[in-house]
Image (cartoon, helix red, strand yellow):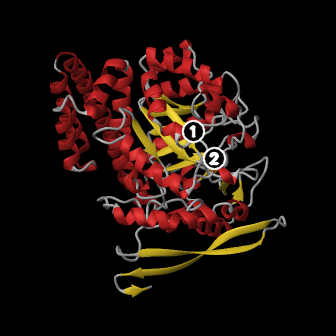
Amino acid sequence: MYRRKINNRKPEAFRNAEEEKSMGELTHKAARAAFGKAIDLTLKHVEKDREKGLLQLVDLTEKFMGDNFPSESYEGARNLIRDPESKWMQYVNRALDEIHPNVIKQTALNLGFEAAFHGTKTIRAMRETHQCNIPWLILMDPTSACNLHCTGCWAAEYGHKLNLSYEDLDRIITQGKELGIYFYMYTGGEPLVRKADIIKLCEKHYDCEFHAFTNGTLVDDAFCEEMQRVGNLSLSISLEGFEEVNDLRRGVGVYDKVMAAMDKLKSHGLIFGTSICYTSKNIETVTSDEFLDMIIDKGCRFTWYFHYMPVGNEAAVDLLPTKEQRKYMYHRVREIRGATGGKPIYAMDFQNDGEFVGGCIAGGRNYCHINANGDVEPCVFIHYSSANIKEVSLLEALKQPLFMAYRDHQPFNNNHLRPCPMLENPEILQEMVEQTGAKSTDLQSPETVEHLCGKCADYACQWKETADKLWEEHPYVHKGYSNYKKKLSKNFHRRSFCVRISRKDNTGRDVYGTKRRSNETSAGGKL
């Protein structure tokens, strides 16, 4: 009987694809190793001749990063290094003196080489391949559990029994790296409840950079030593202001614990900063010279400022900053981080810094959020989804209808001082959620999108005039690469007009919202 010989050889095209991938991985590993050796050499030079060593690092970065950044950025860095008396050079020198060498090296390798260079190139290619948003970073909640019970905490509404297992987190990161994502952040809950798993993930995914938003009360010497050993984990510590105000919300004694945690982190040469929610009640305090001098002295390298979001059925609308307060914040943050004057700390205000990132970064455009239940949400403040990471792949979650709607609509406003589809353009979020059928992911107290967006309507209308004036006074310069879905025309514009409406939602409550009227135009006229 004739027996056909089985051919175990794979088709040529398949073999070529595998070989190409293998060669790509080898090239990538070799490049990482070369970059690592160059960093080691640079750090040695820094000890002897700091200016020469740092200039070599810029040359190395330009060699590897190339046109990922404009050429003037590299020359600007060189000019900064040549001016040792400048504010930002003093900032760099202080960091080099105080941060542990392993932390410097791993941060440069993972945040620089892997995320900014290799990851960015891969992500851009994957966006074209899959025709969906691919984020540069993913924010995840390892747990909903927390050792504190802060008044008004939106995270607490999820309860204390939800968790992403180590296997869940590992799978997300593994799938993310295949898409080019090498930067992962943790929130919660209190992520340091899961210290052991976080360190274990740092070890396994040594090529990724990790960052955790924490209340700081679980930071001890043992954990600091582990952070120093792995080198690829940094922290943002939540702070509301000075002791009286902070402890009023977070509990008696928490402020002192945070101060002690900062001292430990600084003594171990670790990178950390603050995460501050500014409201109508604390905005002047948390941007004051006195407060900033205190956190700088404690060793903070940066401060994230987050605009208060009225998320949740019981959220206090009166905590929303006034238009005058937000205008103050716009100018104050730019003053703090100015090349001259200000403070030697890098301050970021996500609501007012939209011009530097092209508006809203959520919905997978630059980031997304995965809660402790596994729900993949467009933003940490937008609790709606139709995909759960325990049921679908990361790529499938990024293609869910709500995320595709985000992609279709971004930017939500051509004025990037009005970037958010909830806070400044609430009619758009309501439209997207209703049209895609996304469900509330708040398992304890689900909030209708009508109720959420209704709380933002007055704020959006009041801020519009001030924002438009600021935008006109400080025009935005468009970057060479914009990760928006290609529109019908590159001169496409959307203009929205705020119209106040009122009705009752499905619970019988009065809802005040906005209805969008828009003219969509191009160079050829009305579309």
Mark seen at residue 171 = 1
Q: Earlier in the sequence, mark 2 or mark 1?
A: 1
Q: Amino acid at mark 2?
A: Ile
**Which quadrant holds residue 212?**
top right
Residue hosting label 2: 389
Q: Amino acid at mark 1?
A: Arg
Instruction: Report the front residue among 243 and 388.
Output: 243
Quadrant location of the C terminus?
bottom left
- In the displayed structure image, the side of residue 376 where residue 465 appears, left or right: left
Query: Which x, y percent locates residue 449?
Result: 70, 62
Q: Secondary structure at mark 1?
A: helix
Instruction: Judge whether residue 467 can be spotted in this image.
Output: yes
**Which quadrant holds residue 229?**
top left
Q: Are marks 2 and 1 in contact (CB under 8 Å)?
A: yes
Q: CA distance from mark 2 to mark 1?
A: 9 Å
Query: Which x, y percent locates residue 293?
Result: 43, 28
* Residue at point 64%, 29% (across, down): 244
Instruction: Report the front residue among 12 and 423.
Output: 423
Relative to 26, is 18 above or below?
A: below
- The mark total stands at 2
